[in-house]
């Protein structure tokens, strides 16, 4: 082979080797590295043939139109990676909760699979990881969008001089003094709204047979109060549910004047897509039982709902509180508050049409009058 041909051959080899190296490097770049939490899920699935095969089968059974139609196992891992660091948007803040709901909503087999202790244990880690992200500065990217949303009305809130440091910092923002006046604060008979919320009456009287729902979660009053010895005081009484939207103020306050005679947090970590807790573990919730001067006991039950939520209490047993005093706050996630009243105590609630006793949903602000209580001497 002459010298010219040798040179051409060397050039050809060198160029092809470069292309091969670049191709391999490009392929390596395309391989996404899962987060440590999702890697744990991957190990669980890959080491459990029954779980893996049944998950693959469940994915194949997804209907057309479902987000999960024609998806593969790797798509599940990618999905949780994305969810872990999802920044809520004003137009679709609970996006991933509802997308995940689709994978098991009409599939009994996958609901049973996801009840396995291995997955439940992993899910708790995921919830904690997501919560840590929402507490971190990395979650602050979408705050400007929320602050500028007209439904938030940021002018009513205290804004730190350096701005909100995380999404939960924004989500648990404090109201400005005077922005939520308390209706007749010294009148013990008046009930005020515990939060900015949409409120409606529980249709049935409270008892251990008639169940009621909080965002698809089924409760009776004893279960709601974690079998408190005082739960019987509310049997045949009245109740209301206050739903908080993502853009609402997420601190909750006392609706009555009184003394906290019992306080407790119960339930575990949770998600709250529809039917979630029927198949995993109890929703996070807590309660305050408030003894009033002459109007019986009032129950205030914060319940965590969509995506992730944490319930934080700032009051304790034996505290004396006035209407409007802060009891606690919800970190990021959907939230609700259940109000419980003893039998024959509740008068003229604003969320009921008294003529035909039909339930209506009413949007209220914290501190606004929502009803009255009957004196025990008038029972």
Image: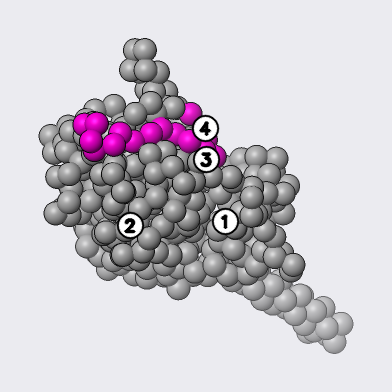
The CA span between labels 2 and 4 is: 27 Å
Query: For numbered disc 4, what is the local secondary structure?
Result: strand
- The answer to whether residue 213 of the structure is visible from this angle is no
Kindly report which numbered mark, 3 or 1, lies closer to the viewer in this rendering. Answer: 3
- Residue indicated by mark 2: 259
Q: Earlier in the sequence, mark 3 or mark 1?
A: 1
Residue 180 within the magenta-colored segment of the rendering:
no
- Answer few, some or many: residues within 10 Å of disc 2's Cα (few below 14, many 20 plus, some between 14 and 19): many
Q: In terms of depth relative to the viewer, which is nearer, 49 or 300?
A: 300
- Residue indicated by mark 1: 171
- Answer few, some or many: residues within 10 Å of disc 4's Cα (few below 14, many 20 plus, some between 14 and 19): few
245 lies left or right of 312: right
In the rendered view of the protein, which quadrant contains the N terminus?
bottom right
- Answer few, some or many: residues within 10 Å of disc 3's Cα (few below 14, many 20 plus, some between 14 and 19): some
Query: For numbered disc 2, what is the local secondary structure?
Result: strand
The CA span between labels 4 and 3 is: 16 Å
Q: Earlier in the sequence, mark 2 or mark 4?
A: 2
Q: For residue 363, which numbered disc appears in the image?
A: 4
Kindly report which numbered mark, 4 or 1, lies closer to the viewer in this rendering. Answer: 4
Q: Earlier in the sequence, mark 2 or mark 1?
A: 1
Task: Name which residue lies at 31% across and 52% down.
Answer: 290
Q: Earlier in the sequence, mark 4 or mark 3?
A: 3
Q: For residue 183, which numbered disc appears in the image?
A: 3
The CA span between labels 4 and 1 is: 19 Å
Task: Name which residue lies at 72% across and 54% down.
Answer: 144
Task: Name which residue lies at 34% across and 43% down.
Answer: 338
Query: For numbered disc 1, what is the local secondary structure?
Result: helix
In the rendered view of the protein, which quadrant contains the C terminus?
top left
């Amino acid at each position: 082979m002459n010298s010219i041909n040798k040179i051409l051959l060397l050039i050809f080899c060198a160029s092809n080797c470069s292309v091969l190296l670049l191709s391999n490097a490009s392929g390596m770049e395309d391989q996404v590295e899962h987060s440590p939490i999702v890697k744990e899920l991957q190990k669980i699935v890959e080491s459990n043939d029954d779980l893996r095969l049944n998950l693959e089968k469940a994915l194949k059974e997804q209907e057309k139109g479902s987000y999960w139609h024609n998806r593969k196992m790797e798509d599940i891992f990618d999905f949780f990676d994305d969810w872990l660091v999802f920044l809520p948007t004003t137009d679709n803040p609970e996006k991933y909760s509802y997308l995940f709901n689709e994978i098991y909503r009409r599939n009994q087999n996958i609901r049973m699979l996801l009840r396995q202790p291995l997955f439940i244990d992993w899910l708790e880690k995921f919830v904690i990881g997501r919560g840590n992200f929402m507490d971190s500065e990395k979650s602050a990217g979408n705050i400007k969008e929320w602050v500028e949303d007209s439904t938030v009305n940021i002018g009513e809130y205290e804004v730190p001089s350096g701005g909100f440091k995380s999404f939960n910092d924004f989500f648990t923002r404090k109201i400005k003094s005077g922005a939520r006046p308390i209706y007749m604060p010294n009148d013990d008979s008046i009930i005020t709204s515990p939060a900015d919320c949409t409120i409606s009456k529980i249709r049935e009287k409270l008892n251990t047979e008639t169940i009621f729902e909080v965002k698809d979660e089924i409760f009776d009053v004893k279960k709601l109060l974690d079998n408190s010895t005082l739960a019987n005081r509310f049997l045949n009484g009245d109740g209301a549910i206050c739903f908080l939207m993502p853009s609402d103020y997420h601190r909750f306050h006392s609706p009555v004047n009184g003394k906290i005679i019992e306080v407790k947090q119960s339930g575990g970590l949770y998600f709250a897509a529809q039917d979630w807790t029927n198949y995993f573990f109890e929703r996070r919730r807590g309660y305050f039982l408030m003894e009033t001067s002459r109007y019986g006991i009032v129950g205030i039950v914060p319940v965590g709902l969509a995506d992730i939520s944490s319930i934080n209490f700032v009051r304790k047993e034996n505290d004396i509180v006035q209407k409007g005093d802060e009891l606690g706050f919800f970190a990021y996630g959907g939230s609700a508050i259940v109000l419980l009243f003893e039998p024959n105590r509740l008068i003229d609630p604003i969320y009921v049409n008294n003529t035909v006793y039909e339930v209506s949903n009413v949007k209220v602000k914290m501190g606004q009058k929502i009803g009255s209580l009957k004196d025990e001497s008038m029972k």
